[in-house]
């Protein structure tokens, strides 16, 4: 016989994501799900951001990678609480993985939690983890065709960091086209041109972050 | 790759629904997958077939209904649908004041059970 069911396939994940969000909200922690391709500069951006904000904000970091602890070691060197999640092959973090590590943080002492997702421009955009906002990075060298090739992440993110802007004179990628297409997909998106290598643009990004929790 | 998580999740939900009704076998599962959901139907079928063994859906087929991306334009008041996974402007008048009506679905809609 036929059974009519209307059930969201990702319902279980969304339920746990809501639990995480409540846990973070109650502790007064603003959580940002940071997403990009591998190598776009997520960890470098976090290093710069922590250096700029650690005097005034208490920051924690969850590092998501398929394998390894390199990123957590880099962040740990800055003396902020960090937990590494190894997904063991999974291409994204999900709400349950975050739920399992949240208790390892002194949440009441934190103002902001960065969740660095697995490097991947596709799947992380599908799975809520309990974040307040999603932020994505696209490095200029990845090319200006990316917004239209991977629209979902651009639609889901509240802000886009265009990183490696110092490479602009050496490559053909057009940052104006990235901005134009990203805004067409998501008119309310905030866009920051940044170079984590030179530090250019980091101040505008960190000023915006401060406005989110004030 | 995340089609594996989605296949896992849909097998679990289907198993629960089947058990709730007191049935013991799932013969088919029908799902609606929006074209803007980020899920590739071929990859989902592959993941489903690989993961169903040993579950009460071990002999089940997965029927995927793809849902196109559609929207409503507030400038020209028309309803439209597109082939792409995204909409940059209304395909009829070029207006940018539109709301998306479908395309992000990721739903189980029907089970055939015994």
Image (cartoon, coloured by chain):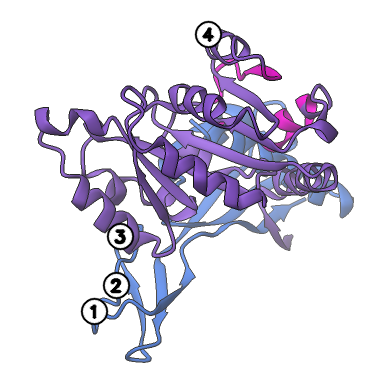
Chain colours: A purple, B blue
Q: Is residue B93 one of those drawn in magenta?
A: no
Q: Which of the marked residues, 2 or 1, is nearer the chain's N terminus?
A: 2
Please tell me whether mark 2 sits on a helix, a strand or a loop: loop
C-alpha gap between disc 2 and disc 1? 5 Å
Residue displayed at 33% across by 60% down? A183
Q: Closer to the camera: disc 3 or disc 4?
A: 4
Residue displayed at 71% across by 28% down? A97
C-alpha gap between disc 3 and disc 1? 16 Å
Q: Which of the marked residues, 2 or 3, is nearer the chain's N terminus?
A: 3
Locate residue A7, reporting x and y percent: 70, 57
- Mark 2 belongs to which subunit? B
Q: Name the side, left or right, on which A131 lies relative to B23.
A: left
Is the residue under label 3 in contact with that under label 2 (CB below 8 Å)?
no
Where residue A164 is drawn, which disc sits there?
none
Q: Say which residue label 1 marks.
A: B94
Q: Is residue A93 one of those drawn in magenta?
A: yes
Q: Say which residue label 2 marks.
A: B89
C-alpha gap between disc 4 and disc 1? 47 Å
Q: Closer to the camera: disc 3 or disc 1?
A: 1
Locate residue A4, reporting x and y percent: 72, 65
Q: Name the side, left or right, on which B97 lies relative to B94.
A: right
Locate residue A68, reporting x and y percent: 55, 8
Q: Say which residue label 4 marks.
A: A70
C-alpha gap between disc 2 and disc 4? 43 Å
Please tell me whether mark 4 sits on a helix, a strand or a loop: helix
């Amino acid at each position: 016989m036929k059974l009519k069911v209307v059930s969201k396939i990702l319902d279980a994940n969304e339920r746990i994501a809501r639990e995480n969000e409540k846990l973070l909200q109650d502790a007064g922690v603003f959580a940002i799900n940071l997403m990009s391709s591998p190598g776009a500069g997520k960890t470098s951006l976090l290093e710069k951001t922590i250096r700029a904000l650690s005097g005034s904000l208490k920051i924690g970091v969850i590092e998501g990678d398929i394998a390894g602890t390199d990123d957590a070691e880099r962040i740990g060197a800055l003396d902020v609480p960090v937990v590494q999640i190894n997904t063991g092959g999974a291409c994204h973090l999900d709400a349950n993985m975050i739920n399992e590590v949240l208790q390892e943080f002194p949440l009441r002492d934190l103002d902001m939690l960065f969740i660095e997702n697995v490097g991947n421009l596709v799947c992380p955009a599908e799975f809520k983890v309990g974040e307040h906002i999603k932020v994505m990075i696209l490095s200029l060298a990845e090319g200006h065709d990316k917004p239209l090739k991977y629209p979902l992440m651009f639609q889901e993110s509240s802000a886009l960091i265009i990183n490696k802007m110092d490479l602009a004179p050496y490559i053909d990628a057009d940052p104006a086209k990235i901005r134009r297409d990203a805004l067409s997909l998501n008119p309310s998106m905030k866009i920051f041109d940044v170079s984590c290598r030179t530090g250019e643009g980091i101040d505008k990004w960190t000023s915006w972050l401060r406005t989110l929790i004030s | 790759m995340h089609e594996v998580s989605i296949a896992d999740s849909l097998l679990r939900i289907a198993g629960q629904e089947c058990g709730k009704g007191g049935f013991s076998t799932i013969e088919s599962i029908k799902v609606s997958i929006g074209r803007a959901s980020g899920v590739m139907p071929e990859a989902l079928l592959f993941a489903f077939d690989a993961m169903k063994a040993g579950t009460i859906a071990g002999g089940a087929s997965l029927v995927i209904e793809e849902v196109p991306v559609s929207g409503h334009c507030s400038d020209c008041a028309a309803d439209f649908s597109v082939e792409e996974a995204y909409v940059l402007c209304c395909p009829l008048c070029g207006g940018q004041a539109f709301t998306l009506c479908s395309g992000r679905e990721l739903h189980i809609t029907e089970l055939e059970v015994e």
